[in-house]
Image (tube, grey):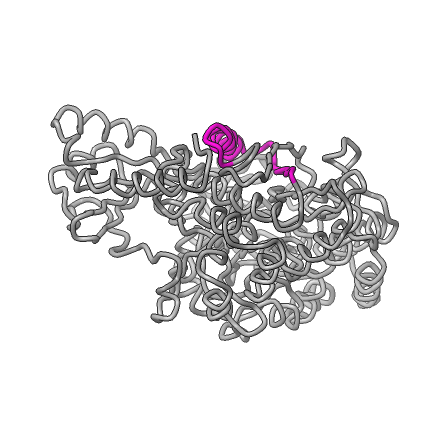
Amino acid sequence: MINSFEDFTEYSASVKEKSLNKPEINILVSLGTCGIAAGTLPVQEEFISQIKERELSSKVELTDVGCMGICYCEPSIELINRKTGKSIIYGNVKRDDVSLILDCLTEKDVKGVDVIKKSWYYPETEDATAGLLQAKIALRNTGRINPEILEEYIFNSGYQALAKVLSSMTPKSIIQEVLQSGLRGRGGGGFPTGKKWDFAAAQKNETKFVICNADEGDPGAFMDRAVLEGDPHSVLEAMAIAGFAIGSHKGFIYIRAEYPLAIKRLQIAIKQSTEFGLLGKNIMGFGFDFEIELRYGAGAFVCGEETALIHSIEGLRGMPTTRPPFPAVAGLWEKPTIVNNVETFANVCAIIRKGAQWYKSIGTETSAGTKVFALAGKINKVGLIEVPMGTNLRDIIYDVGGGIFDGKEFKAVQTGGPSGGCITKDYLDTPIDYETLKSLGSMMGSGGMIVMDEDDCMVNVAKFFLDFTVDESCGKCTPCRIGGKHMYAILDKITKGRASDKDLETLRELCQTVKSSSLCGLGMTCPNPVLSTMKYFENEYREHVADKKCKAHKCPDLITYLIDIGKCIGCSVCAKKCPVQCISGKLKEPHKIDQSKCIKCGECFMACKFAAISRN
């Protein structure tokens, strides 16, 4: 139990000393949600069994960690030689590979096992100035420590920032440090974090609240989940610092109920910190009290908006309200409240420990620090990355992400989730920061990045994202509730070949109206995918409307499958594959397709080995 600053200092020193006697080899096993889903548990079991069988416990330590970020090659493990400091990552590890890895026990390639990367880890971006693309601040411990063991977090400078602010800083100096760092909210809006804290601190109210927004709802986004599964204490520590800075003694983490592993590890972390005296009453003997509770979301995307989230915590329906007053003035139960997302909090402790100038030296003048992105879609290396702000798209997609899947041509990337916009290949060399993305008709958002290739139809992509936001609208304001449905109806007409040029004009006008008159960010940004695709891919919209064609063959109503009687040998494979039996013909004679019954599934096209079926 930590009862004083001296206790904490002594305990931290003892943890460091204890680490000197740890085994020479440390094997990290990726046990985030992605790793578990890919089958890491049997690999872990085999390591445990063989280490025991070979009597290697004095030489090898097995550490369960969160997501390493390399989701494309799970199950993955990292072998670290503590003596040399070198490491190697093995990906796509199978149970049978374990014996091969243990036979070696050095940072060498193992025949038959995929070697992903050597010297993978770059801690807290001292490397950011060394020309390396990835730089870890928010993800500094994710995939590096066992998230269920407090001692491992403390060994990696855990709770040092909280000790520093309680022992040597004032609330005002903390806020000033965060302000000077240039840290902006990583949840989408990019509002300066220090300003938000300053507004709340200025309120003359004895009751204030700190809320961590972990309601990550963007399709293809998993940044917050990875941090909470792999480094939950970093968020708890940062929330306590925020509480001390604004004069709050109570924090809430609003987390999706669909994140059971993150919830479990948060519960363990809160229990450990409270029992150890790092949360709760009289933290480290400084007279500061701060406790944290979990509140579960029910899957409503709109609750990512801070006022809707606050209402949900209050037990009300999650619907946004007009601002002002802002939550920093009158938020949860009408008390001053700050709401920051997981990634924002994950940056705070490093800023306090290393200083504002260190953080501001990374990134760009207006967008300091790093940004975590979830790379998804048609890309070879799907996973989680963290790069300095200002890194260009080309480096992210082709270097870090390994290029487009199956050698296809890059077409566009959707940033900012369903509320973002599509960026084309003409802007691949554009630096990624808040202002640049906004100027291109997109947004940073929480960090989802979905890559599309030549086979994607941009009209259909816009329709997909709009379908999501229409379904997730809370229905409170008319522009979003009704306007969104009308936009979707027009897109549906376009993809079915029933639209006219007049519909395109109406769609543009409707997008601008919804964008300018909606109540909250969901309605204001839901037209972005439509507007950006209409701007950069107008020719595709025109083809759908004028020619009734979808060159990408993604819009079923604009596809026709035809059998070339000159090439068809009557093998009947296509007829057997057809799920609605719309293909007829005698064996060894040309077949034909009944267009009135065809559902445009494409099974016949893919099954034909003689190129006798064309797709128009």
Give the answer, above or below, for where 368 lies relative to 384.
Answer: below
What is the quadrant of residue 124 in the picture?
bottom left
Residue 272 versus residue 341: which sits nearer the camera?
A: 272
Using residue 468 as the reference point, say whether residue 69 is left or right of it. left
Give the answer, above or below, for where 243 lies relative to 552.
Answer: above
The answer, for residue 564, to whether it is visible in the render is no
**Which residue does the image show at 26% across and 48% down from the upper left?**
89
**Which residue does the image show at 38% across and 33% down from the upper left?**
149
The answer, for residue 77, to whether it is visible in the render is yes
Image coordinates for residue 343, horizontal then vertical, percent: 54, 51
For the image, the number of numbered tags is: 0
Q: Which quadrant, please, contains the C terminus?
A: bottom right
Q: Does the magenta stretch include residue 275?
A: yes
Q: Which quadrant, please, contains the N terminus?
A: top left
Image coordinates for residue 143, horizontal then vertical, percent: 37, 44
Using residue 589 as the reference point, say whether residue 337 is left or right of it. right
What is the quadrant of residue 511 in the picture?
bottom right
Q: Does the magenta stretch include residue 432?
A: no
Image coordinates for residue 265, horizontal then vertical, percent: 47, 32
Residue 491 versus residue 136: which sits nearer the camera?
A: 136
* Magenta region, residue range: 249-278
Image coordinates for residue 554, horizontal then vertical, percent: 59, 54
Residue at the right extreme of this rendering: 478
What is the quadrant of residue 105 in the picture?
top left
**Which residue does the image show at 82% across and 51% down from the upper left?**
480
Residue 191 versus residue 378: which sits nearer the camera?
A: 191
